[in-house]
């Protein structure tokens, strides 16, 4: 999805009235595209304004237009691209798997009546 091309990709605009966490937001950021989204989109939590994207009210047309104008400035979207990519670098499949699977041995131990605190420390997700 993040292949190289001679065409300049357009940063995505998601002025959603409600979306808990759209995949396209993660995909765009991972591909180094700044994201323009709304305050009612869960992806807003990943956005650092003027660094990797912009956030405004979904129906605030002047704000959306202003942010699009800023992204159209020569070099701005490209300059924000690395920050966009970096903002989701830690959200890898490997880390997610560690966070989901890590507690399972602890749950099995608890069900068997064992309580090993060293295992808790060893299996806790690492930053």
Image (cartoon, rainbow, N blue to C red):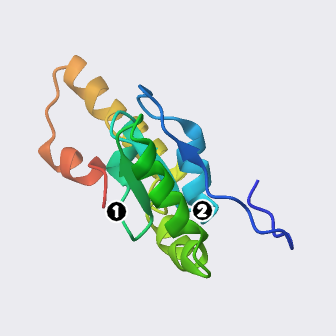
Q: Position of residue 53 (x, y in %)?
A: 45, 60
The residue tagged 1 is 48
Image check: 32 left or right of 104? right
Task: Determine which of the numbered discs, if any, sits on residue 108 in the image.
Answer: none
Most extreme residue toward the right, as rendered?
6
Callout 1 secondary element: loop
Q: Position of residue 87 (x, y in %)?
A: 43, 63
The residue depicted at 17 percent of the width and 50 percent of the height is 118
Instruction: Give the residue furthest to the top.
Output: 111
The residue nearer to you, when weighing 49 against 42, is 49
Q: Quadrant of residue 73?
A: bottom right
Alpha carbons under labels 2 and 1: distance apart: 13 Å
Nearer the observer, 54 or 19: 54
Q: Is residue 123 left or right of residue 63?
A: left
Q: Secondary structure at mark 2?
A: loop
Residue drawn at (45%, 43%) of the image = 61
Any mark on residue 33, and which?
Answer: 2
Question: Looking at the image, is 2 positioned above or below residue 20?
Answer: below
Q: Position of residue 94 (x, y in %)?
A: 52, 51
Q: Report x, y in % for residue 54.
A: 41, 57
Asked if the residues shown at circle 2 and circle 1 are in contact, with their CB atoms under 8 angstroms apart, the answer is: no
Q: Give the position of the C terminus as an image quadrant.
A: bottom left
Upstream in the sequence, badge 2 or badge 1? 2
- Identify whether 57 is placed above or below 8: above
Within 10 Å of the Cα at label 2, are there few (<14), some (14-19), or many (20+) other Cα atoms?
Answer: many
Q: Residue at x 23, y 17 (%)?
A: 111
**In this view of the protein, which residue sits in the foreground, 20 or 55?**
55
Which residue is rendered at x = 55% and y = 58% of the image?
A: 29
């Amino acid at each position: 999805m993040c292949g190289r091309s001679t065409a300049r990709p357009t940063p995505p605009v998601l002025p959603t009235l409600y979306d808990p966490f759209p995949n396209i937001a993660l995909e765009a950021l991972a591909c180094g595209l700044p994201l323009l989204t709304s305050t009612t989109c869960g992806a807003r939590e990943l956005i650092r304004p003027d660094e990797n994207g912009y956030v405004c009210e979904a129906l605030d047309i002047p704000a959306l237009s202003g942010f699009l104008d800023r992204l159209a400035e020569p070099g701005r979207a490209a300059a924000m691209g690395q920050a966009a990519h970096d903002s989701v670098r830690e959200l890898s499949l490997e880390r997610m798997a560690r966070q989901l699977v890590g507690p399972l041995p602890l749950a099995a131990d608890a069900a068997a009546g064992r309580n090993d605190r060293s295992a808790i420390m060893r299996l806790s997700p690492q930053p």
